[in-house]
Image: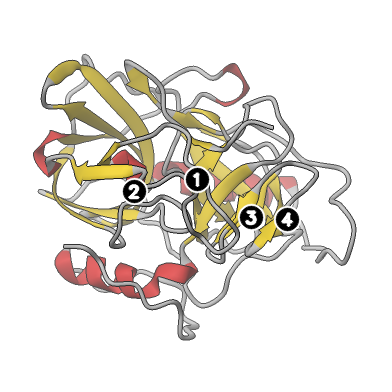
Amino acid sequence: MPRPRPRTGTRIEVAAFSIALLAVVGAGCVKRQQIPDIASLHAVAQESSSGVVAIATTIADNPSHITLCSGALVAPNLILTARHCVSRAVTATPSCDARGRSHNGDHLAEDVDPASIAIYTGAHVRPDVDVPVARAVRTLHPTGQVLCDADVAFLVLDRPIVGASVLTMRLHSPVETGDIIMPVGFGGGLQNVVGLKVARARSIVLATGPSANALTGAVLGPREFEVDRATCRGDSGGPAIDVVSGEIVGIVSRGGSCSANGNHVYTRVDAYKRLAQAAFTAAQREPNVAAREVPSVDVNPSR
């Protein structure tokens, strides 16, 4: 079984999702979530898609090398995304255990210069020709250089993004096995068209950490969860939207083959409540989160 890897590529690197709904979800108790009707799902997809933006990072020593990720607008000038979208990679194959520890050393080096991170909106993005709507001025993320259990980051922008929906994060409770989510990102869906934004119907949460799924090979830290077939090459940092509430519950971190069932790992946003609060403060915005709040994991931002 191949090790999980971040959703990145070579020249234009993206992270993506594919449509999937697994008919059977392992053994044991699984919560049966009430699934909205088609009209409600369509409304959630439209609203969520409007708040998902493309994040293009140019490497300073190689201007032709552009990394394309996805992110969610959680305030007019604040984006939630994945840590590996804003830091230089040391390895393409992070190996983690169920405690959220690395088996192969550091996964990340220093942060990229925020000025090299450009933000794009629209249904189909081409960073090589399109004009960005904003640029990053600051990144915030957990301390350390390991992706395991900590692949989350916020970008403070140099200006508000106009015409896009601001999405709500759910920080008061985590996802559960059996929940239905809607991934949204710039991977182009089943066709995997780089830069094309697609909301991918619905996907099942197969497991939550800490755990190891012997059927799929996924190893989940305490702040992670696994979905069935919701990630392909593309859309790193793209949000997982709860289909009932419309709230962001996770962001895509890493996964196995695009064609594999399972072994697609997300970082839970509720586990990073303190980081989120620090990000809203840095952006000088009021928190845009669900009303109910409970204590969460205490994580110090690195900057």
Q: Which of pointers 3 and 4 lies earlier in the amino acid sequence?
A: 4
Disc 1 to disc 3, how far (Cα)?
16 Å
State the residue position of label 1. Answer: 252
Specify the amino acid type for callout 4. Pro
Q: Pointer 3 and pointer 4: residues touching (CB < 8 Å)?
A: yes
Depth check, front residue: 227 or 36:
227
Mark-to-mark CA distance, 3 and 4 = 7 Å
Q: What kind of residue is marked 1?
A: Val
Label 1 crowd bin: few (<14), some (14–19), many (20+), radius 10 Å: many
Question: How far from the left and from the top, in percent, is residue 90?
Answer: 32, 36
- Position of the C terminus by quadrant: bottom left
Mark 4 is surrounded, within 10 Å at the Cα level, by few (under 14), some (14 to 19) or many (20 or more) other residues, namely: some
* Image height of 296 relative to 276, above or below: below
The secondary element bearing badge 4 is classed as: loop
Q: Which mark is residue 83?
A: 2
Residue 288 spot, x, y in % from top left: 35, 69
Task: Give the number of the mark in front: 1 or 2.
Answer: 2
- Is there a contact, CB below 8 Å, between mark 1 and mark 3? no
Q: Is residue 264 above or below residue 2?
A: below
36 left or right of 239?
A: right
Q: Nearer the viewer, residue 83 or 33?
A: 83
Under circle 2, the secondary element is helix
Q: Which residue is mark 3?
A: 243
